[in-house]
Image (spheres, rainbow, N blue to C red):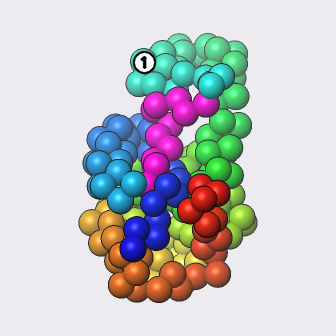
Amino acid sequence: MNLLAETRCTVIGHMQYANGRDIRENINQQLSSMNIKLFDHYKQPFLMDVNEGEETHDELRLALKNGDYEKVEAYKEIRSYDLSLIDRSDFVIFVYDPEVVTCGSWEEFFTANRMKKPIFFVNVRGKSATPMWVFWTMPHKYIYNSVEEVIEKLQKIDQGKIPIDSERWKLLRNCFR
């Protein structure tokens, strides 16, 4: 059926204190086989964008370490661009590792929730290690133990094997995607 063809997804998760590139590349490979577009913070999807690549993060980590807070603050536009990706996404995948500090991911998560976007929350340490606040924010059926579980669910939705079971899905007809 290919119900999810030409839809857009943002993967949110750690970037500052751990490598977030590998998980995004892995998910992108799997989503692209379903013709789903992945917005990747590392790949600058906007025409005019702030470079959010690894070299920028290295530079900002060094500035933070050296107390050059004005330089760090000068990159605040990244926040606006990242939140704009949530706005443009049809659904969101949050890959959460409770052992890695993350801040912007939480704002993106709660923004997506307020917008009633479908959110697939993955806790890499297991669903039972998920903060209770997440359970109070969304039904537990949208909380997963692994990225593989999410991909399997998306494949079944894409193939029409399971119905889109959430009021959150607001898919445009194919001709408008």
95 horizontally vs 137: left or right: left
Callout 1 secondary element: helix
Label 1 neighbourhood size at 10 Å, few (<14), some (14-19), many (20+)?
few
Q: Residue at x 65, y 22 (%)?
A: 48
Quadrant where the image shows the N terminus: bottom left
Q: Nearer the viewer, residue 97 or 154?
A: 154
Q: Position of residue 49 (x, y in %)?
A: 62, 25
Which residue, given by chain and number where applicable, does mark 1 sit on? 55
Amino acid type, label 1: Glu
Quadrant where the image shows the C terminus: bottom right
Seen in the picture, residue 63 relative to 140 is either above or below; the reply is: above
Q: Residue at x 32, y 42 (%)?
A: 25
Q: Residue at x 72, y 66 (%)?
A: 114
Q: Nearer the viewer, residue 152 or 128?
A: 152
Q: Residue at x 58, y 78 (%)?
A: 138
Q: Position of residue 69 (x, y in %)?
A: 65, 19
Residue segment shown in magenta: 36-46
61 horizontally vs 49: left or right: left
Seen in the picture, residue 67 relative to 15 is either above or below; the reply is: above
Residue 37 magenta-highlighted? yes
Seen in the picture, residue 42 relative to 35 is either above or below; the reply is: above
For residue 58, which quarter of the picture? Answer: top left
Residue 82 magenta-highlighted? no
